[in-house]
Image (cartoon, rainbow, N blue to C red):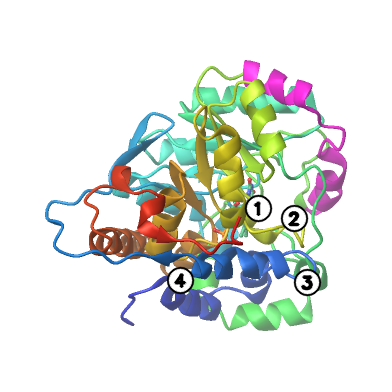
Amino acid sequence: MPVITEIEDLKRIYKRRVPKMFYDYAESGSWTEQTFRENSSDFDLLKLRQRIAMDMDNRSTKTTMVGQEVAMPVALAPVGLTGMQHADGEIKAARAAEKFGVPFTLSTMSICSIEDVAAHTETPFWFQVYTLKDDDFMKRLFDRAKEAKCSALVITVDLQLLGQRHRDLKNGLSAPPKLTPASIANMMTKVQWGLGMLGTKRRFFGNIVGHAKGVTDPSSLSSWTAEAFDQSLDWERIKQFRSWWDGPVILKGILDPEDAKMALNVGADAIVCSNHGGRQLDGALSSIRMLPQIMDAVGDKIEVHLDSGIRSGQDVLKAVALGARGTMIGRAWTYGLGAMGEAGVTRALEVIHKELDLSMGLCGRRSVEDLDASNLLIPEDFA
Ligand code: FNR
């Protein structure tokens, strides 16, 4: 067993264990992948201020996100197809998050269904919906999430159109994977992954197949996706979705201060400053660079979370110091899942927690609540 001390270690194992098609699906950004790269590299522009002799004993990373207690300001972002990264992947990840004390968000595009995950966990999870045209299907999804006692609804608002990802098109991404000579040859080298897949019946999109009109055959899914997303989405419709859900609503995919103000107007409880991990509008600024503007616009009126590019506890610290109440991680937990299943997701959370806790202490802070911009050295042209 290799020693795992950083997220990059999990990524290396993940790459070895999972078929290329699914590794590429997680690793890709849209078009030139500029935004994908800058999401991470822009964190490096923010420097931390080292402080000493400030009593760093008894530290705590605990806080709340949408009023719910969390062990650290990190939630697992919704990631589609994770049941293809590891057999029953969504259940494994939800269990790891539950044990660690952070929220797990189940994607609409998951392999395990809402009911599957609810049956294998005790702590309520968050559910993510895409904005689809079909109101009946949307209402059914909301009802299923209510029945599963989901504790927050994450509405992803940055995917009316799908950003083009070259690698997925070239690989012919599908779930389950299409059998071509190249995909078969590649999968034959992924023995553990293959045995896991043989041992589970969960290989299709559990929230969609059999629930969405016309989708009984998963091979029709790509055409269904192209037809199903609501390209005419507007704020009135988002307001309507808000009214269908009694609990906390988080709007994910806000990258502009004007949109942040609109989110406030429709009654969202929180927003996620996010560019979908660089998978949508290539050329957009990184989330961490947009965060200060978003905070100026709405930071005192609504909870702001941030995702896109987080690979370490230091990244979490920087986002929180700039005002985010919490963060979401996408690829970081996906690497862990593909590498080692539930244990890998736990390891990803442990790594980030340790980095956050120690770095917070080295900045002279004992609690995440005490972090603010004074912990950072921010370049003048950052925001
Ligand atoms: C995503 N993301 C995503 N978001 C969403 O709302 N629903 C989804 O189904 C998916 N699916 C998905 C698949 C994969 C493979 C990735 C990498 C991402 C976006 C995700 O929730 C989050 O915004 C980003 O992953 C954050 O960026 P990092 O942490 O991956 O850099």
What is the quadrant of residue 354 in the picture? bottom left
145 relative to 133 in the view: left or right: left
Return the residue at label 2: 280
Question: Residue 307: x percent and y percent?
Answer: 55, 52
Return the residue at label 1: 276
Q: Which is in the foreground here, disc 3 or disc 4? A: 3
Give the Cα distance between marks 1 and 4: 22 Å
Q: Which is in the foreground here, disc 2 or disc 4? A: 2
Give the Cα distance between marks 3 and 4: 27 Å
**Is ligand 1 less than 8 Å from the beta carbon at label 1?**
yes
Question: Residue 57: x percent and y percent?
Answer: 12, 55
Say what amino acid the circle numbered 2 marks: Gln
Return the residue at label 3: 32
Q: 113 or 126: which is nearer to us?
A: 126
Q: Callout 4 environment at 10 Å: few (<14), some (14 to 19), or many (20+)? A: many
Q: Which is in the foreground here, disc 1 or disc 4? A: 1
Q: Callout 3 environment at 10 Å: few (<14), some (14 to 19), or many (20+)? A: some
Q: Is residue 224 magenta?
A: yes
Say what amino acid the circle numbered 3 marks: Thr
Give the Cα distance between marks 2 and 1: 6 Å
Give the Cα distance between marks 2 and 4: 26 Å
Q: Which residues are magenta?
A: 219-243
378 relative to 279 in the view: left or right: left
Outermost front residue: 380
